[in-house]
Image (cartoon, rainbow, N blue to C red):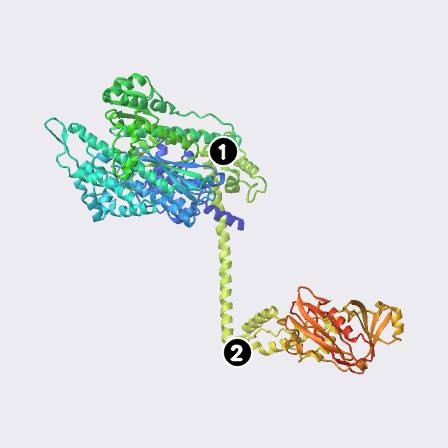
Amino acid sequence: CNWLTSAFVEDNADANMEGALIARDRVGVQDFVLLDSHTSETAFLNNLRKRYQENLIYTYIGTLLVSVNPYKELDIYTMTQMQLYRGVNFFELPPHLYAIADNAYRVMCSEYNNHFILISGESGAGKTEASKKILQYYAVTCPTTEQLQIVRDRLLLSNPVLEAFGNAKTLRNDNSSRFGKYMDIQFDFKGAPVGGHILSYLIEKSRVVHQNHGERNFHIFYQLLEGGDKDLLCWLGLERNPQKYSYLIQGRCAKVFSINDKNDWKIVRKAFSIIDFSEKDIEHLFGIVASVLHFGNIQFEEDSNGHAIIRNGTQIKWISKVSLSSQIVLSPLNVDLAFYARDAVAKAIYGRTFTWLVNKINGSLANKDSTRKTVIGLLDIYGFEVLDTNSFEQFCINYCNEKLQQLLIEMTLKAEQEEYELEGIEWEPIPYFNNKIICDLVEQKYKGIISILDEECLRPGEATDLSFLEKLEEKVGDHAHFVTRKLADQKTRKSIDWVDFRLLHYAGEVTYCAVGKCEQNVSLEVLCNSKNGIIRDCFLLSELDNRRRPETVATQFKNSLTSLIEILMSKEPSYVRCIKPNENKEPGKFDDYLIRHQVKYLGLMEHLRVRRAGFAYRRKYELFLQRYKSLCPATWPHWHGPAAEGVERLIKYIGYKPEEYKLGRTKIFIRFPKTLFATEDAFELRKHLLGMVSACWRGALARKEAKKRTWAVQIIRKFINGFINRKKPLCPENVEFVRLVQYTYFMKLRDHLPKNVLDKSWLQPPSILEETSEMLQKICIRNLVRKYCRGVTAERKVQLQQKVVASAIFRGKKEGYLQSINQPFMETRLKENDINPKVLQLIHGEKIKYVTPVVKYDRNGFKARERLLVLTQSAAYVVEMAKIKQKIDYATLKGNGVSHWNRNKGGLDNSLSTCSLQFRVGSGKEGTMIFTVGQEPQIFKAKNGQLTVVRFHLNTGNMTCAFSSDAQPSWRARLTLSCKCLLYKLLRKRPPFLFQRAEMCMTKLPGQHLTYIR
């Protein structure tokens, strides 16, 4: 039952897509691909509603994420959630924005390719918040350093600056992005963010001069007035009350409860410092913001000639002070044209300043390292818009969405086809609506709507909205997706005005008003001589000298969109579709009509149909087998063969029909959701049965554990009582405790016994075992001594006996003697077999005690000659080959001793680099030996004719040689080459000799002692 329990626990913890199918009737399915009625818009909305009511705002369509704005704070963006989704397989956890971000990041790091995440939806659907959450996820989960922290902060704080200058309150959203934004986040080979780049598209310049009722201008105007300090406002000529400025009062909602302009101003000011704006840049930037407000307060009156004049020049003075030059340019215009020119200048200044701002941020985010980077792009762009009156802005926005929808379908089909081919499954062509025909209607060269608009705006003569409409009817009137009032049938004609035209987009019909389209495409070429550095950068003098007609706004937008599509086509895609649940921003309210409208315009049903045209579910063999192996006896509890064979055995046992599935190279593909649902329901039933078995098993384990705890309580009580009575004689109350103490002490003592006879350590016993411990210690020491004695070899015993003799001679006479005790004597003794037989005969059978090789150094020239020194019971012999060169009777030796050099230091002091030995031999003959240190030991005749002994500079034990004058001397000698040479030098003369005095001091080498002979 252990494996039954384990499997039950594992499956209970399962939070993946299959596990969530159990509650599908209450919370819907996590992936729309698993809907039975995948072509039903009603089924789609019902599933979305179920999940939204359970605060499940995210749902997949394959790898596309659908997000519904909850209009309230949800506890799903914490650090814990970020770590939960970090490095996890895409479908292992419930749908989440973090799963999209992490999947793009992991694939980028593993395959070293570029990605983009496309976030689209209506204003107020949560696009801006989604892009913020993705940036925060990368900032928290990606590796970073102190230097990269600066880049991370700049990436995060670029958002408040762009929101201040590019976002505004609208009827649908209090923080609506009024421009399209594409941001590339650059990563190094370690996966750390190292830079970024931002592209902006079609900022809504018209908002600068006009706002609808209930809407506001861009945030920066209100932030400056509310949060700017008094000195700054005074220098700019501004007052705190926004009601004083014409460009801020048209929407009649300067104050908004949900917006804290003062706090947002502080964030923007902090962001400027981190993004590396200079004080001069900030001064010029605020000067432009103030100038726009002053432009709005300029009023014109008509003079006697019908020309516009300015009666009050206060605003002009402030504008010339903070931004423009004081140069006067006169242009005769009527009042209407003067107001139009004023607004055009304000829009042009603000629009180009916003472009300058984006470029400045890009300079701050730029990575100077030339090594290759991988990127993840974030595209936060307006969704399809259908308003009561659709102007030029809506035309550009919807054209952009047509292009992106085309890209989405093409890349989705491409990804599906590539996966099928990779898995070896035959690809079946999928029919879908190809909106290329609509894109061509808008952008086709010479024939498209944008080309016709350019032609009308730039042709000689006066271009009007009606002439533009007539041109459209002439050139594209026969197109199936283009309708005007003139070209429409009787039924449709009633819904189209004379100045309108209608396009049949992929998402539905949209009627556009042609009024103002030609006006909106007139380019401005002024303000080149401003004293404001930013304005000079935005309006170059070279523009005035350029004779070519400037591109219209529509053409500029088409070109930038084409460039964007090329960028996206070179990257791997991920998609987030944001939906606004209601117009009033109320939590929990699900407006079916509004959401149905967005589902249609976002192309979600079309995308779902493409995904479901093949197989609804696909999973790797290993994961499928791991989850459902309990449904087949052959695969439960363990399958030991290849996973593909295990899955094949499993689905045959379950009863899958051939048309319900396909087996790829690494995955199983299931065509119908009902097949998966049936499998999951069977698994749930089996898990329930396993749960019952597991419950019984856990009950048995719990009862067994309860018995163990009862026994443990009794034992603990018994030993507590024993501890209390531990000093009493052995009795039933303390016997268990005493036995435990004894056992514990003996077990510890076993691991802490002395290792040798010199180890005096012994484990401290408890008081009740002191006598026993003392007896055990004596036994242990005796055993160690006995073991040591038995381990001493005969050779080692002789060595120790020799050490005893040496100790009797040298102990107490040399400080360094103790350091030589533990070093064994070096064996240089020769055997009788090594002596020439003739020499043995000449010795006349004396018992030989010691034989060793020596070197003789002649007195004249110190030439080295090899000899043997033979020590017998009564005399010493110097032998050359088969001849006895010299005999020395022990009776001629007067005694033994040590040199005064060794008496205090235990040997020749290392601090004495050189010393000498004076000797006198025979009848007044004297000599000198020089003892010194060097790189290697040697004996040679110096230039001054003296014998020089060089020792190696190494401080170790001493060399010992002792002569005894007893009747039967016991020779124990250890002589190095130097010792032997010096000894022979002194003894080489035939007796009788009168040794007046001779002293020798030998160097300290390993295993050697110093020699002194008198």
Q: CA distance from mark 1 to mark 2?
A: 78 Å
- Residue 999 shown left or right of residue 40 in the figure: right
Label 1, secondary structure: give it: strand
**Picture quadrant where residue 632 is located:** top right
Answer with the quarter of the image where residue 440 lies: top left
- Which mark sits nearer the N-terminus, 1 or 2? 1
Which residue is located at x 15 percent, y 37 percent?
A: 313
Above or below, 920 against 668 in this view is below
For mark 2, give the secondary structure: loop
- Residue at the disc numbered 1: 669
Residue 278 position in % (x across, y down) = 31, 45
Q: Quadrant of residue 96?
A: top left
- Circle number at residue 508: none
Q: Amino acid at mark 1?
A: Phe
Q: Position of residue 364 (x, y in %)?
A: 36, 42
Q: Is residue 862 above or below residue 585?
A: below
- The percent position of residue 29, horizontal first and vertical second, equals 40, 38
Q: Nearer the viewer, residue 85 or 11?
A: 85
